[in-house]
Amino acid sequence: MFFAMADDTRRELFQTLIRNGGTSASELARGLPISRQAVGKHLEVLSEARLVRPRRSGREVRYEPQTQTLKEASQWLNTLARQWDRRLDRLANLAESGLHDNPDEEA
């Protein structure tokens, strides 16, 4: 998922899909300086990352954003951030207590 969102074009495609809902690769390509085929390849990467879902509507394939994957990643990152905050707080407390143990020593 992070690899897929690391690319500027894929982020722009994803944001467009969120704003507009289901959209075809041809419609998405109209607003970009790249070919419809290149858009299709970017959409394939987004699909493999579970960020978009292709849906066939007759002969047309429309891509719909799947925000659940981003929500899951956000929750994981928030959990990780809280863990690191606790670790850094403990480290700061240890460092501060060490400074108070030897008041005569210079740093």
Image: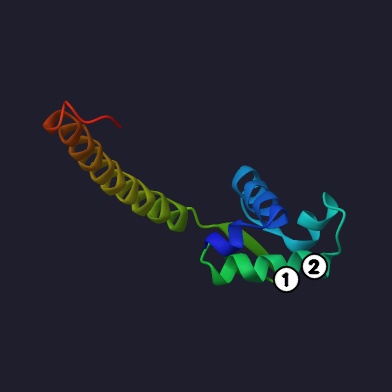
Q: What's the residue at 24%, 42% (across, down)?
A: 91
Name the residue rendered at 73%, 73% in the picture: 59
Residue 38: assigned label: 2
Specify the label residue 4 is tagged with.
none
Is the residue under label 2 in contact with that under label 1 (CB below 8 Å)?
yes
Q: Position of residue 83 (x, y in %)?
A: 26, 48
Residue 29 location in percent, x, y? Answer: 81, 57
Q: Residue at x 34, y 46 (%)?
A: 81
* Residue displayed at 56% across by 72% down: 48
Q: Which residue is mark 1?
A: 41
- Image location of residue 31, percent across then percent down: 82, 49
Residue 69 placement: quadrant: bottom left
**If the image is split into quadrants, where does the C terminus sit?**
top left
Q: Secondary structure at mark 1?
A: helix
Q: Hey, what amino acid is under mark 2?
A: Ala
Residue 69 versus residue 57: which sits nearer the camera?
Answer: 69
